C-alpha cells in the first residue's frame, strides 16, 4: 500500500463526503428503489399491489415474475434490435469520427484547432429534442432531403425516409457523433509524432504505421468513445420515438411506455434495472481495461 494512502486522515475522507452524498442520493438510492419496485406487482389501476404475505411471495418465486416476463420472445426481439442498432451506431460513429479527430489533432494548423473543436460542440448549444424535430422536417416526404434528390434527378418520386430504421440510425449517429470525436481528439493530441516517423523509417508504410502505431496508442480514446456512444444509444428513446415511430421500438421506448402508458411500474423497473446492469458492467469493464493498461479512467 502506498505511503500516502496509509497516511490518510479523517480530513481526507471529509473532503470526498459531499461527493458520496450526491452519488448516494441521486444514483444509488434511486437504483435501490427501482430494484425494490421491480420485485412488486402492478396494481389494478397502476401503482403497486400490496403484498399480504411477504414470505410466501418470496418463497414462491413470484417476486421474479417481472424478470421472467422480460425474457419473453417479444421483449427479447426488442432488446436485440436495441443492441444491434447501438453496435452499428457505435461503429459508424467511430469510422466517421476518427478521420475528423485525426485531422483536428494532427493535421490542422494550431490556429484552426479551437475553431474546429467549437464546431464539434456547437450542436450541444441547441436542445437535442429540437434537433431531432429538425431531422423530421428534413426526412419527411416533402422535406429537404427528398427535394434535393428530386431536383438532382436521382429519384422520380419522394422516398419514405422517415419512420424507418435508416432514419433512426441517422438520428443516433448524428446525436452521438460529438461524444466519439472528443475523446478521440484528446487521445490523438497526445500522440508522439516521432513514433510515426520511426515507423516509416523502419520500412512501414502509412497503412501499417496507422494500424500498428497510431491505433494502439490511441486505444484508450477509442474505448472511451465507444463507451460514451454505445451506452446512450442502447437506452435511447427520443430518436426512435420521433424518427422511427411505432415501427422501431427500442428498449428505451419499452421502458418509457411501461411507465407512461401501461402504468406498469414494476415491469418497467425490471427492464430499466436490467439495462442499468448492462451499462454498469460496461463501465466496470472499461475501468478494468484502463487499469490494466495503466491509463487514467476517462469517464
Image (cartoon, rainbow, N blue to C red):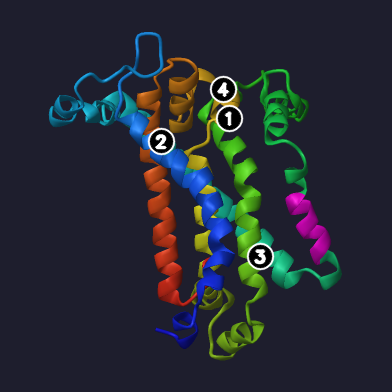
Instruction: Return the residue nearer the eye: 66 or 46.
Output: 46
Percent across and percent down for residue 155 are: 67, 25
Lower sequence index among marks 4 and 2:
2
Mark sitting on residue 163: 4
Where does label 1 land, which residue? 238
Residue neighbourhood size for the residue with mark 2, other residues' Cα within 10 Å, grouped as few (<14), some (14–19), many (≥20): few
* Quadrant housing residue 113: bottom right
Residue, far front: 10
Percent across and percent down for residue 55 are: 16, 29
- The residue range painted magenta reads 113-121
- Looking at the image, do the residues carrying marks 1 and 4 touch, with CB atoms under 8 Å apart? no
- For label 3, the SS is helix
Mark sitting on residue 33: 2
Q: Quadrant location of the C terminus? A: bottom right
Instruction: Return the residue nearer the eye: 287 or 214.
Output: 287
- Looking at the image, do the residues carrying marks 4 and 2 touch, with CB atoms under 8 Å apart? no
Q: Nearer the viewer, mark 3 or mark 4?
A: 3
Lower sequence index among marks 3 and 1:
3
Q: Is residue 215 visible?
A: no
Q: Nearer the viewer, mark 4 or mark 2?
A: 2
Amino acid at each position: 500500500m502506498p505511503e500516502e494512502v496509509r497516511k490518510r486522515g479523517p480530513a481526507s475522507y471529509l473532503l470526498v463526503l459531499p461527493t458520496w452524498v450526491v452519488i448516494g442520493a441521486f444514483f444509488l438510492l434511486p437504483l435501490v428503489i427501482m430494484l425494490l419496485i421491480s420485485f412488486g406487482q402492478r396494481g389494478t389501476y397502476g401503482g403497486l399491489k400490496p403484498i399480504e404475505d411477504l414470505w410466501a411471495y418470496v418463497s414462491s418465486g413470484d417476486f421474479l415474475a417481472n424478470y421472467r416476463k422480460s425474457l419473453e420472445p417479444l421483449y427479447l426481439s426488442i432488446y436485440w434490435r436495441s443492441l444491434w442498432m447501438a453496435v452499428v451506431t457505435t461503429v459508424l460513429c467511430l469510422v466517421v469520427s476518427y478521420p475528423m479527430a485525426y485531422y483536428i489533432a494532427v493535421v490542422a494548423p494550431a490556429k484552426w484547432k479551437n475553431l474546429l473543436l467549437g464546431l464539434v460542440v456547437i450542436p450541444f448549444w441547441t436542445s437535442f429534442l429540437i434537433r431531432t424535430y429538425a431531422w423530421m422536417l428534413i426526412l419527411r416526404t416533402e422535406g429537404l432531403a427528398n427535394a434535393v434528390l428530386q431536383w438532382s434527378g436521382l429519384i422520380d418520386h419522394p422516398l419514405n425516409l422517415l419512420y424507418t430504421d435508416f432514419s433512426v440510425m441517422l438520428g443516433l449517429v448524428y446525436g452521438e457523433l460529438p461524444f466519439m470525436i472528443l475523446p478521440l481528439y484528446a487521445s490523438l493530441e497526445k500522440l508522439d509524432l516521432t513514433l510515426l516517423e520511426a515507423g516509416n523509417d523502419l520500412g512501414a508504410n502509412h497503412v501499417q504505421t496507422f494500424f500498428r502505431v497510431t491505433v494502439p496508442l490511441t486505444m484508450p480514446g477509442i474505448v472511451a468513445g465507444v463507451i460514451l456512444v454505445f451506452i446512450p444509444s442502447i437506452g435511447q428513446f427520443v430518436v426512435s420515438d420521433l424518427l422511427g415511430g411505432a415501427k422501431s421500438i427500442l428498449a428505451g421506448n419499452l421502458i418509457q411506455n411501461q411507465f407512461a402508458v401501461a402504468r406498469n411500474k414494476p415491469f418497467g423497473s425490471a427492464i430499466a434495472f436490467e439495462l442499468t446492469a448492462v451499462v454498469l458492467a460496461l463501465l466496470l469493464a472499461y475501468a478494468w481495461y484502463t487499469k490494466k493498461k495503466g491509463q487514467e479512467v476517462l469517464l
